[in-house]
């Protein structure tokens, strides 16, 4: 195309319009816009014609209709009589839950493995290496199937259990059962105390920082904060007359066999679909995070540690004040994209009956046939999650980057 | 008495003694790397225990208790109530299906030729020192896809059937996995380059459109893209026009990976020093010649590891097509679980283990290659 | 490189786009391409299931082969596209498949709102429950508090919700995308109950580790008439689908089977004569040759043969005719006469 233009642009005095980068820029952009509008028009008219021909309803009215199907996990009140819109919202909350829990565990495991890979201990670093190379080279879906179908068979059946932590937490094929806190009137004060503790910790930390800048005196901020955040609610709990008790799961061992096992809706039950999905997601993502952490720590030159030691800092403060802040600058950008990947990968829940956004939306799609609307909701939700996360991480990254001279 | 008698001055080097046994050899190595402190010793013991508890049952299952031959499920049923090992006999019986799907038996030679051509063309392309790179690249990227397309789908000229048509519904197994991954990556390369250039363009609308496109596809999960291509795409087309299901998936996968490819290529473009652009412009090159002759050859060489990594990701992600009802390797394995002739308690584990081994070999091999290339390329750009 | 490659990819891509001329009837399309494309399930023993060699068998598959026999006189002129529950209607609407015999329940909304037509019922089904024998449950009404595995995106998920709600029983639903996953989860003990169409229960039971440890409860909680589906607005094709099914049923009623069909051609029974095209021109009425029904019976068989070969008592599924017997033998199968 360019060569043709070169041939036609003969008169250099006047043909500048073709050669003018600005004019050509406008021309290319105009072509792009026209192409986009035409293809957009083509798609929209075809879609409308198809919907009309196939008698498929369109619009958002279906969100109000009764869903009619149940679910095995919802963080908010949900029943078969709830609306389609509410069902999708329940799925959205489930996606958020698995993403947050998954990110937490992936970060913890990832940091441990990343540090272990740099360990002096040969066995530990080899294990960490094998973990990373094994896990990240096997498809996530296969790992989800493994956790759900292979590991699930290894745990006790519904009429049996494994108990941990002095018989308070139990595991069987129906999930992980634990005690559920039941709040009584007056319990709201505990919440207030917690908020107060957090605020007080922030204030104390600011004050201590200022004082150290001015006078050089240090203050044990961490332990004070722990005391405030844990101590205040506990104190309130005792003062207000213990307005909370634990509802322990009820394991029935007699009666008809179907009724044996844990009673429905007593205590907290974490469904196995959630456990398998979280395990697969966090272990898979952790293998990537481990590599990021390793690269981040290796990126901090050894001179930094030596200089810190020369200044008289002990090992702890060296790590905390010198190495980690610099490593974090390298770690955070790729870490963000791993968090986003985990969130997006949580949509594989659809393969193992975890009622996430895609799974619940898929059921709605099936029942109403309104593919465009449902897929639109999916994409909008994941896009906004992505944008929010990257915005937050950019902000955080900027704060960390300020350390630089 | 002279001074020399009062002081002993050594005039030659002392004989070199071997280092203490505890710091050299196997023992020294172990001391240093395994038992340097109490904490380290505990870690070593825990580590060995963990490794043993994971590896021992795996070997027990996959090798010791395994059943290697048999005609049907009887061979693999647990003997006298004991544990049953991997049922490799089942994998053996299903092996052709895992590799070719339900491709007609008498036409399988066509798939084999494609596999063969693929390997023969890819290997010299991947070896940096092999000659005839350009001819090889053209063969691999231009001639091979056309040949493979006609070999796999069939060729009918006029009324004469040169190769009988094999519809994509019977494709499956590794064939589908490779077709999706390779087509996805090869087709997304030009699109990705265009998007990367668009994102770095000075034209605001081109830039905006590229950014929106890239961020859109990077922001949504692949599974929603697949649902979109399998459920929504037919609605976008005029009445009577239908796309083959595999082609629909390929379109979705290509658009999806093009966005990731664009970011990889953009990284390469950014790594090219500004002097290269300025030098090219000073020579009077326009935009496309500058890109084609100066910038892209350097940038693309730089991003080969990134492209390989994208390919690994895509290769693993092809398993998702089983959710929209296609039979890739994992899907084919899963569908074989429903065959009552081979239904045993260990069938599922065996199938998943087989899938894991195949995927791992491919992905690990490619990641090694990517590291190798990275090291090789790194030296050239060190300053 | 990229410049040369892109057009090639596009060119190759266009080759795979099947553009059917708008306005042509399905029959013309099918005759032009030489085979019928059928949408079937992704693997349901007895209805549509591929074996290790990739050959499809089953009641739904036989229906599709019968249509191919009616149109081409050749039962092998049928190709199969496995479809998930989610995709099936889109695939039919968009023309990817010509007919959808995919154990699909005939409901009013599907018949009227999706631009589809049901060509009849080739299997009367109903939703049932399967449990482990050692649970000691004998009726679905004892299932209060049970966890239930099922498929998402089907009517079964809604029926089970209605049933438990109507009987005021709490339950936990575990809904999977694919039937194989439901079976695997139920087999692993994740659920107490597996619910789907009763025929499906018998079929899926074969995939369990120990089929003998499980039983199907007597309750049938819904009506599930399963039938082949075609696009709305093409009456000619709709008629062919409808009468293919009716021909198989009439053949059974008249005692014509694939074994005796050649002798039956010389039968004196006018009904048989009309069926086999010896008398009258009924095939031409639906755009086919007059021996259309002969071809069906010769190549595929009558309904009884198909039933017995795929789901009947002598097959691993072991389903008795029950309500699927002919109307004069205590069942619901009643085909309008050919005359």
Image (spheres, helix red, strand yellow):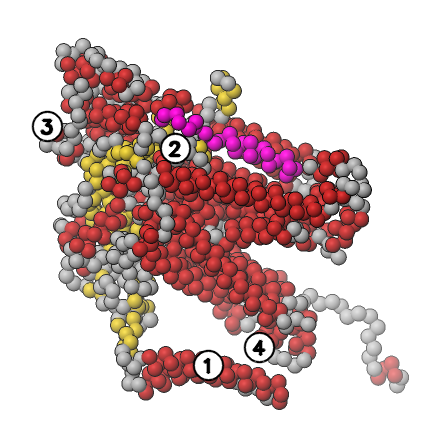
Placement of C318 over or under C249, stated as above or below = below
- In the image, are marks 3 and 1 on the same chain? no
- Sort mark 1 into few (<14), some (14-19) or many (20+) by Cα contacts within 10 Å: some
Q: What residue sits 56% from the left and 46% below the top?
A: B258
Local crowd at mark 4 within 10 Å, few (<14), some, or many (≥20)? few
**Classed neighbour count for the residue bearing mark 3: other residues with Cα under 10 Å, few (<14), some (14–19), many (≥20):** few
Q: CA distance from mark 2 to mark 1?
A: 63 Å
In front of the other: label 2 or label 1?
Answer: 2
Alpha carbon of mark 4 to alpha carbon of mark 3: how far?
90 Å
Residue C255: x percent and y percent? 15, 20
User: Is any atom of residue A257 visible in this view?
Assistant: no
Pair 2/3: label in front: 2
Res. C100 visible in picture? yes
How busy is the neighbourhood of tag 2: few (under 14 within 10 Å), some, or many (20 plus)?
many
Residue A163 among those drawn in magenta:
no
- Label 1 marks a residue whose chain is A
Marks 2, 4 in one chain? no
Which residue in the structure is indicated by mark 1?
Answer: A199
Q: Secondary structure at mark 4?
A: helix
Q: Is residue B218 above or below residue C122?
A: below
């Amino acid at each position: 195309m360019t060569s043709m233009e070169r041939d036609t642009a003969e008169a250099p005095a006047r043909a500048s319009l073709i050669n003018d980068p600005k004019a050509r820029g406008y021309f290319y952009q105009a072509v792009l816009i026209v192409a986009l509008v035409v293809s957009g028009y083509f798609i929209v008219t075809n879609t409308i014609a198809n919907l009309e021909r196939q008698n498929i309803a369109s619009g958002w009215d279906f969100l109000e209709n009764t869903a009619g199907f149940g679910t095995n996990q919802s963080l908010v009140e949900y029943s078969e009589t709830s609306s389609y819109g509410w069902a999708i919202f329940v799925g959205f909350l489930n996606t958020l839950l698995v993403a947050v829990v998954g990110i937490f565990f992936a970060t913890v495991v990832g940091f441990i493995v990343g540090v272990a890979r740099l360990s002096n201990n040969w066995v530990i670093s080899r294990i960490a290496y094998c973990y990373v190379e094994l896990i990240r080279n096997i498809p996530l879906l296969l790992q989800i199937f493994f956790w759900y179908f292979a590991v699930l068979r290894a745990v006790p059946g519904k009429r049996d259990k494994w108990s941990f932590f002095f018989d308070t937490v139990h595991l069987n094929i129906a999930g992980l059962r634990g005690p559920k806190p039941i709040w009584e009137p007056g319990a709201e004060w505990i919440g207030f105390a917690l908020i107060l503790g957090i605020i007080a910790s922030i204030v104390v930390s600011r004050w201590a920082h200022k004082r150290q800048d001015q006078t050089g005196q240090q203050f044990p901020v961490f332990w004070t904060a722990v005391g405030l955040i844990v101590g205040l609610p506990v104190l309130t709990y005792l003062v207000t007359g213990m307005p909370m008790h634990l509802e322990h799961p009820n394991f029935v061992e007699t009666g008809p066999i179907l009724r044996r096992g844990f009673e429905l809706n007593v205590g907290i039950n974490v469904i196995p679909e959630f456990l398998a999905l979280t395990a697969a997601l966090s272990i898979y993502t952790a293998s990537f995070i481990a590599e990021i952490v390793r690269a981040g720590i290796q990126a901090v030159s050894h001179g930094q540690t030596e200089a810190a030691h020369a200044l008289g800092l002990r090992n702890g403060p060296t790590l905390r004040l010198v190495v980690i802040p610099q490593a974090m600058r390298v770690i955070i950008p790729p870490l963000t994209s791993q968090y986003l990947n985990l969130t997006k990968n949580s949509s594989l829940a659809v393969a193992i009956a975890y009622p996430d956004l895609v799974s619940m939306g898929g059921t709605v799609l099936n029942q109403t046939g309104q593919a465009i609307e449902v897929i639109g909701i999916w994409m909008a939700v994941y896009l906004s999650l992505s944008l929010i996360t990257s915005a937050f991480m950019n902000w955080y990254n900027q704060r960390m980057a300020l350390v630089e001279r | 008495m002279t001074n020399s008698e009062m002081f002993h001055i050594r005039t030659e080097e002392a004989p070199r003694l071997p280092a203490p046994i505890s710091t050299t050899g196997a023992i020294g190595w172990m001391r240093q790397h395994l038992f340097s402190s109490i904490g380290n010793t505990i870690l070593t013991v825990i580590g060995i225990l963990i490794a043993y508890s994971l590896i021992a049952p795996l070997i027990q299952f996959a090798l010791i208790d395994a059943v290697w031959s048999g005609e049907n499920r009887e061979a693999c049923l647990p003997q006298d109530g004991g544990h049953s090992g991997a049922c490799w006999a089942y994998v053996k019986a299903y092996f052709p299906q895992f590799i070719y799907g339900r491709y007609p038996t008498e036409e399988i030679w066509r798939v084999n030729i494609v596999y063969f051509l693929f390997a023969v063309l890819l290997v010299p392309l991947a070896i940096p020192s092999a000659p005839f790179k350009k001819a090889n690249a053209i063969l691999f990227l231009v001639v091979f896809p056309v040949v493979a397309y006609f070999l796999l789908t069939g060729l009918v000229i006029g009324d004469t059937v040169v190769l009988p048509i094999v519809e994509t519904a019977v494709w499956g197994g590794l064939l589908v996995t490779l077709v999706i991954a390779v087509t996805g990556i090869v087709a997304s390369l030009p699109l990705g380059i265009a998007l990367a250039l668009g994102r770095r363009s000075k034209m605001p609308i081109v830039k905006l459109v590229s950014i929106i496109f890239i961020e859109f596809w990077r922001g949504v999960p692949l599974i929603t893209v697949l649902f979109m291509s399998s459920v929504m795409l037919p609605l976008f087309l005029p009445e009577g026009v239908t796309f083959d299901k595999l082609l629909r998936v390929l379109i979705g996968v290509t658009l999806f990976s093009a966005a990731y490819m664009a970011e990889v290529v953009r990284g390469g473009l950014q790594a090219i020093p500004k002097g290269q652009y300025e030098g090219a412009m000073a020579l009077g090159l326009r935009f496309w010649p500058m890109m084609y002759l100066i910038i892209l050859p350097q940038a693309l060489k730089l991003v080969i590891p990134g492209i390989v990594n994208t390919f690994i990701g895509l290769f693993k992600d092809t398993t998702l097509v089983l959710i929209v009802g296609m039979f890739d390797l994992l899907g084919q394995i899963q569908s074989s679980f429903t065959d009552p002739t081979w239904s045993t308690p260990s069938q599922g584990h065996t199938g998943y283990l087989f899938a894991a081994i195949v995927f791992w070999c491919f992905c690990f091999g490619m990641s090694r290659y990517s590291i190798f290339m990275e090291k090789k390329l790194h030296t050239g750009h060190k300053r | 490189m990229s410049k040369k490659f892109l057009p090639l990819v596009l060119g190759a891509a266009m080759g795979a786009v099947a553009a059917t001329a708008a306005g042509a009837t399905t029959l013309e399309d099918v005759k032009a391409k030489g085979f019928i494309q059928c949408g079937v399930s992704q693997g349901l023993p007895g209805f549509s299931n591929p074996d290790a060699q990739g050959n499809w068998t089953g009641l739904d598959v036989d229906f599709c082969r019968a249509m191919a026999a009616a149109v081409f006189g050749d039962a092998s002129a049928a190709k199969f596209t496995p479809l998930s529950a989610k995709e099936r209607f889109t695939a039919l609407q968009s023309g990817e498949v010509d007919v959808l015999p995919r154990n699909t329940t005939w409901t009013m909304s599907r018949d009227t709102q999706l631009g589809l037509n049901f060509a009849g019922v080739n299997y009367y089904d109903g939703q049932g429950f399967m449990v482990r024998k050692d649970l000691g449950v004998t009726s679905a009404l004892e299932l209060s508090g049970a966890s239930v595995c099922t498929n998402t995106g089907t009517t079964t998920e809604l029926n089970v919700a209605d049933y438990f709600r109507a009987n005021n029983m709490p339950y936990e639903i575990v809904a999977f995308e694919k039937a194989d996953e439901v079976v695997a989860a139920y087999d692993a003990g994740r659920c107490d109950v597996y619910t789907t169409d009763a025929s499906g229960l018998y079929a899926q039971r074969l995939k369990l580790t120990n089929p003998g440890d499980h039983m199907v409860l007597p309750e049938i909680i819904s009506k599930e008439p399963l039938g082949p589906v075609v696009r709305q607005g093409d009456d000619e094709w709709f008629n062919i689908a409808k009468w293919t099914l009716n021909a198989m049923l009439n053949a059974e009623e008249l005692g014509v089977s694939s074994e005796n069909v050649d002798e039956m051609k010389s039968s004196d029974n006018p009904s048989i004569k009309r069926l086999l095209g010896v008398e009258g021109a009924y095939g031409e009425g639906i755009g086919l040759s007059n021996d259309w029904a002969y071809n069906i019976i010769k190549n595929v068989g009558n309904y009884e043969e198909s039933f017995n070969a795929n789901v009947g008592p002598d097959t691993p599924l072991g389903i008795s005719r029950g309500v699927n017997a002919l109307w004069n033998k205590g069942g619901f199968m009643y085909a309008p006469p050919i005359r």
